[in-house]
Amino acid sequence: MRMRHKKNLESRLEAVSDYLITVRNESLNFNDAQTERHLIDLKELFGNDNPVYLEIGCGKGQFGCTFAKQNPHVNIICVEKVRNVIVIACEGAKKENLQNIKFIDCSAEYLPSYLPEKSFESIFLNFSCPYPKKRYASHRLTSERFLSIYKKLLKDGAPVCQKTDNMHFFEYSIESFTQNGFALSNISLDLHNSDFEGNIVTEYEEKFSSQGYPIYRLEARLK
């Protein structure tokens, strides 16, 4: 179902333009994004050389804004392809006057065109769409084609951190990471009843956990 266009969306996006990196990706496809380069200068973007983290599929920005607030000496870029949603995330960052967070409105497959390689301390995948039907498996953010992107963007030894409420998607992700040269660590089958410290709860996480669903989490690093 197509999401209804939010009232005054364009004016709202303009009001948060300091937080939003609007990229032109309508002419790109997955293959083009591997070769076309419109790279963002991260030092210029944030005005510093602090470490940079990346969240893909940030939703309304609860994780990204909390992470930025808790870690003022690092930067984070949050990616969200739905403009109706990313505007809420940008408004939240502006309300908090956060200086170390930016948002990109594009699909994850276009990131190689805009983000420099070997630049990110970690990639966060929080409650990505599981695309449960097998014919849509290539759209999952832990499928081989997306893992090939993360390999380029991550610094050596940096992890992909995944959280989901979907057991089947989590099992698929474990298999996909393993088959594509990643080593897994800090695997939790019930995050909220584990001894893991420092978890930042997302809006989806609040919803699913309150309904009694266990939260699954892992970290994946290239071997």
Image (cartoon, rainbow, N blue to C red):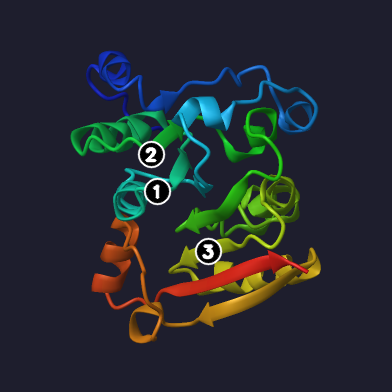
Q: Quadrant of the N terminus?
A: top left
Of badges 2 and 1, nearer the viewer stands 1
Q: In this view, does 221 lie above or below 104?
A: below
Residue at 67% x, 17% y is 27
Who comes first in sequence, dot 1 or dot 3? 1
Q: Name the residue under label 2.
A: 100
Residue 170 x/y as whole percent: 56, 70
Tell me, for residue 162, which label it has, or none.
Answer: 3
Q: Marks 3/2: CA distance?
A: 22 Å
Would you name the residue on which mark 1 appears?
73
Horizontal and vertical percent position of residue 116: 67, 35
Secondary structure of the residue carrying numbered label 1: loop
Quote the CA–CA distance across marks 2 and 1. Answer: 8 Å
Residue 61 in the image, given as x and y percentages of width and height? 33, 44
User: In the rendered structure, are the residues bearing label 1 and label 3 in contact, judged by CB atoms less than 8 Å apart?
Assistant: no
Q: Which of marks 3 and 2 is nearer the N terminus?
A: 2
Question: Which one is in front in this view, the residue at disc 1 or the one at disc 3?
Answer: 1
Q: Is residue 89 visible?
A: yes
> Regarding mark 3 in the picture, which secondary structure is present there?
strand
Question: Residue type at mark 2?
Answer: Asn
The residue closer to the viewer here, 115 or 134, is: 115
Q: Which of 222 and 52 is in front in this view?
A: 52
Q: Which tag is nearer the camera, tag 3 or tag 2?
A: 2
